[in-house]
Amino acid sequence: MAAWIPNVINMKQQFISATWSTLYMTIVSALIAGIIGLAVGIVLVVTQPNGILEDSIIYSFTDKVVNVLRSIPFIILLAVIAPLTQYLIGTTVGTTAALIPLIFGIFPFYARQVQNALLEIEPGVIEAAQAMGSSPIEIIFSVYLREGLPDVIRASTFTIISLVSLTTVAGAIGSGGLGDIAISVGYARFENDVTIVAMLIILVIIFLIQITGDWLAKRFQRF
């Protein structure tokens, strides 16, 4: 083993720490961005033309905000949002500081995914709920989120996998994690075994997220 990955053997503790840092950035930013993105996605669906709470001003504003934030390349967003990160966290370097750009980078993407998932629900189901006298809040929770749950889970899985990729980009410029090790150590020092092992750990994380997401989507598809 030592002959194949000599540099990795000497960096066991760094790899363990980097893996935890990547998981920390992924889980915390996924939870916060997930809540924001889900709320924004629901707002887009219910306020759209012919939506249950149709409002052209709110829909147009929310739609444009999502489009603008989605259009900014993440590497540029990291720099643009640095003053806000400095204000909120007190520094722009480190895993906690990376949470701010990760949240702003992923929640618009997730909001659009949620919107697309909820739009897959048959309009007849929503019309039936309205005919039965259900309030907008009841329709959101008992129709949109219940009927669209499998698709929302698939969208969440896809989004979290994208988020793991963003943590590696953030790691390349000082947030820590596996991306930091792969670039600042493996690539910069020509230690290819470090880069390859970091990549393999990231792939394992992504496979586990995909397997869990597929299992949850199938489980809730039955109901």
Image (cartoon, rainbow, N blue to C red):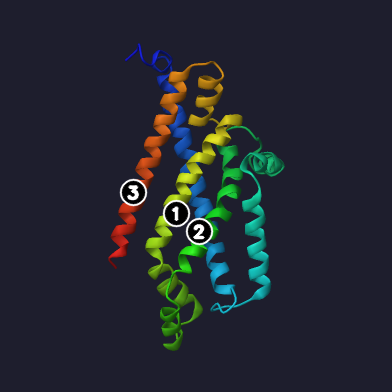
In the image shown, does 147 or 67 lie closer to the viewer?
A: 67
- Residue under label 3: 212
Q: Give coordinates of residue 146: x percent, y percent.
A: 39, 69
Q: Give coordinates of residue 128: x percent, y percent.
A: 41, 84
Whether residue 107 appears in this view of the structure is yes
**Within-10-Å neighbours for mark 3: few <14, some 14–19, many 20+:** few
- Residue under label 1: 156
User: Which residue shows up at 59% across the image and 73% down it?
Assistant: 48
The CA span between labels 1 and 3 is: 11 Å
Disc 2 marks a residue whose amino acid type is Gln
Q: Is mark 2 on a helix, strand or loop?
A: helix
- Residue under label 2: 113
User: Which residue shows up at 43% across the image and 60% down it?
Assistant: 152
The CA span between labels 2 and 1 is: 8 Å
Q: Is mark 1 on a helix, strand or loop?
A: helix
Left or right: 204 in relation to 101: left
Disc 1 marks a residue whose amino acid type is Ser
Label 1 with label 3: CB-CB less than 8 Å: no
